[in-house]
Image (cartoon, rainbow, N blue to C red):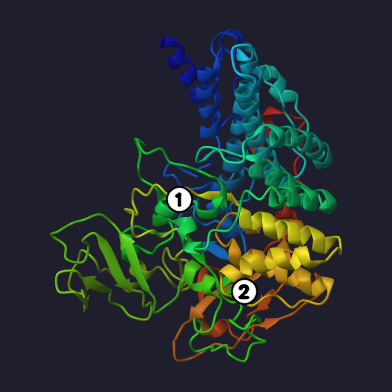
Amino acid sequence: MKKIFYIIIIIGLGFSSCKKTLDLQPLDTVSSTNFLTNEAEIKLGLSGVYNGAQWNYGATNTPLLKRIEAATDFCLSRKGSDQEDLMALGDNGPFVNGNGIPTSAWSNAYTLISRANSFLEGIKAGQAATPAAAYNRMRAEALVLRAWSYYHLMAWFGDVPFITAPLAPSDYETQTRVAKATIADRLYADLDEAWNNLPAQNDRGRVNKGVAYGLKAKIAMLTKNYTLAAAASKAVIDANIYSLNPNFMNLFSLAGQNANAGNEILFMTQLPSDNANPLSYLQIGLLPRQVLGTSGNNYPTQALIDKFECTDGKRIDQSPIYDPANPSRNRDKRLGWTIFMPGDEMNVATGANVSLPYQNPVQRIQYNIYTDVVIRYNWTTNTFVNVAGNPDYVSSSNSVWQFGSTGSVGGVGYCWRKYIDPAQNAFAGKSGYILMRYADILLTYAEAKIELNQIDGTVSSAINLVRTRAGQPALSAISQDSYRQLVRRERGVEFAMEGIRYIDLIRWGIYNEAVNGPIVGAAKIPTDVPAIPTFTAGTKDLNDIPDYTASAAKRISSRNQTRLTTPKHTLWPIPQGEIDKNQNLTQNPGW
């Protein structure tokens, strides 16, 4: 029992640091040789490595990748604090040296790397006492988790220190940045080993074969090795292990995740059922104060709304069935599955309270941003009622709806539906945040083949599998450019708010073009319909980047009304604290 206690202390605490990342303490000699000595102890140690992969921002189970989504054209954070003002993006924004998001990302990634390195070294003491298959599997899991960190570090920071073994504390102060290509080559070898030793399916929340080669494909796409990306993703497809869940929304509910139809979810975070701190901001952070009495922190933008095609498969400016006065009509089903639009009905669980007839246990709300009152469903009378006189539910419209350009608000009229699960208390939900799913494998394969200009039936089949689930017609592209446009559009609407968009924009080389400009949303006055945006192909291929110049005055705008990015924003600054400790670390250009 004492030995298990020490393992927990070593794995859970020995690597944790939020302020001094690269001087994380490795396992000491006694720990490495005496504590991971058999299969049970190695399994326990691996759990500590997985705990380092949660990557929360703050102390409220808020996925870091979800927050980073607000650094894209599809999302913004509300104005209210230095942590939430994520999209100022100028020199007063979060990408200033030492500010929250880059520092948190660096710390999270290197904490996981340190845990994986110490685990990989420590398990050597228990190899002889552990069945070979189990030993190789657990080693493979740690290799994948380490590669997961390096993939994100390369995408966010470029060349980074590459550490693959426990180091003495003084050695952390001499690390230099290593070229992405060098790092990628080592990661490919690690992921090949993992593919050969991982099962097709693993316990919920743990990596499997699909994750190993899915990650290999992602790294290859980041470094523009499209041949390798196509081969890795095709290997996952040809394994015939995974398929799409026929119900898109089930991917984002606890019951659906537990069932995992089609094994579509390959990797996700997981909150333990006995979590001592059940508060989860995964749902809370997606909804306005009017629903839960606390402020959301991420909101969709008009650029995302307008990315969804009409049901005829055409972009809104090209479709004769698009209705600007009713933008939800005749649209890709994923719009309704992903976004709450004005006029929609919200159902959010907040726990049973028989003394409050509007909350027993699900709040049903008419989402209407154009009124100063809140219309809730009374479960006693079974009617929607205006509860304007009830102080438990209503405050000023500004703080209730959080939309507009004043105060501590920042939304532009829309809220996320994805991850809202009325079967769970929103304050204590146990849904995991998806990190990789099979739809990504399919679209990565298609994109890699398109970039190679090797367009054949397997490409259209991969894309159409994803489109068919949403009820969209099969694509009818005829050129490499049109295929490229369609697969990028498909990735945008399929993976909105899943932590993928930012890296996509970076690797496509269109981050500044997509993000710069006014942040706009729904019509200010519902009867004064804004003009349809224009879409210009420009010199960056066909990327569906909308121009709202003609309609911005009629649309709700955020407090951070215009994003001003420059080329330096395509790489984040190395946290200044790391450079202060290690003079061998050079800063990214412009920072």
Q: Is residue 520 left or right of residue 128?
A: left
- Res. 268 visible in picture: yes
Residue drawn at x 52%, y 67% as measured from the top left: 300
Q: Position of residue 59 (x, y in %)?
A: 43, 41
Relative horizontal placement of residue 81, taking residue 306 as reference (left or right): left
Q: Quadrant of the N terminus?
A: top left
Q: Residue at x 78, y 74 (%)?
A: 482
- How many marks are shown on the rendered structure? 2
The amino acid type found where label 2 is placed reads Lys
- Disc 2 secondary structure class: loop
Which secondary structure lies at badge 1?
A: helix
Q: Is residue 426 above or below residue 150?
A: below
> Would residue 515 be found to the left or right of residue 247 on screen?
right
Give the residue number, with chain letter if any, for mark 1: 259
Earlier-in-chain disc, 2 versus 1: 1
The type of residue carrying mark 1 is Ala
Q: Which residue position holds label 2? A: 307
Marks 2 and 1 sit apart, C-alpha to C-alpha, by: 30 Å
From the top left corner, tell me how far across and down residue 175 is, in percent: 75, 27
Instruction: Where is residue 394? Give x, y as percent.
Output: 25, 69
Q: What residue is shown at x 44% (from left), y 87% (from top)?
A: 526
- Tag 2: Cα neighbours inside 10 Å, few (<14), some, or many (≥20)? many
* Of the pair 164 and 445, the residue shown nearer to us: 445
* Residue at the image point whose x is 37% and y is 49% from the top: 429
Q: Which quarter of the figure has residue 483?
A: bottom right
